[in-house]
Amino acid sequence: MVLHIVRHGRTTANASGLLLGRADPALDDVGRAQAATIAAAIAAPARIISSPLARCVETAEAFDQTVEIDERLIELDYGQFDLTPVADVSTETWAAWRSNPDFRPPDGETLGELATRVGQALDDLWSDAIKGDGDTVVVIHVSPVKAALAWALGVSIEVSWHSFVSQASISRIGRGAGDTPSLHLFNSTAHLT
């Protein structure tokens, strides 16, 4: 039993270097090709779980199986920063954000809140997975992937500032000692080459 943690394929907003939170663009042509490659790389999962946003759902649909939606897996709410070029966020704002998991972008969500809701979703998925047969694919966004990393390692969400997640990457969380989650793979893009 493995949780395959998949970051969705590319959108035009991602390609343009924009912070992409709750805005809901579809995949671009590259993203659709990436989704097909991801589906080919993960053989016959028992379940497909997705964030409700179109870019994740479209990536998940490449598996040609029933897609279950979990609202808790939605991307971080960047509030007023949504669709802002990354380079346009001030140095001071980035410093405040990186130093405090309770930093809230205007009208947005904190990393601590993200970690709580994603952690609850993963707790539920983990409980289901260790009782069931087969692997589960979880199609999510960059910040929830980083929250999944923190969850698997049992560390603070602040690890998110020390990790990089590529588009269309695959991470794997498998069973460790005592049925605890264990990080087996992080940010693999080997399937894309």
Image (tube, rainbow, N blue to C red):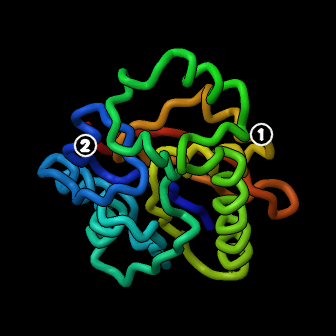
Residue found at the very far top of the displayed protein: 91
Helix, strand or loop under label 1: loop
Closer to the camera, 7 or 98?
Answer: 98
Residue 101, compared with residue 119, is above or below; it is: above
Residue type at mark 1: give it.
Answer: Ser
Q: Earlier in the sequence, mark 2 or mark 1?
A: 2
Which residue occupies 19% across, 56% down? 32
Residue 133, compared with residue 150, is above or below; it is: below
Q: Position of residue 10 (x, y in %)?
A: 26, 46
Which residue occupies 48% across, 46% down? 78
Q: Which mark is residue 9?
A: none
Residue type at mark 2: give it.
Answer: Ala
Question: Pointer 1: what residue?
Answer: 156
Which residue occupies 43% across, 25% down? 89
Closer to the camera, 13 or 132?
Answer: 13
Helix, strand or loop under label 2: helix
Left or right: 129 with respect to 9?
right
Which residue occupies 68% across, 79% down? 128
Q: Position of residue 146 (x, y in %)?
A: 58, 43
- Neighbor class of circle 1 (other Cα within 10 Å; few <14, some 14-19, many 20+) is some
Residue found at the very far left of the displayed protein: 29
**Mark 2 or mark 1, which is nearer to you?**
2
**Residue 37: quarter of image:** bottom left
Q: Position of residue 135 (x, y in %)?
A: 54, 70
Give the distance between the C-alpha atoms of the residues marked 2 and 1, in whole angstroms. 29 Å
Question: Pointer 2: what residue?
Answer: 13
Residue 186, compared with residue 72, is above or below; it is: above
Q: Position of residue 185 (x, y in %)?
A: 56, 43
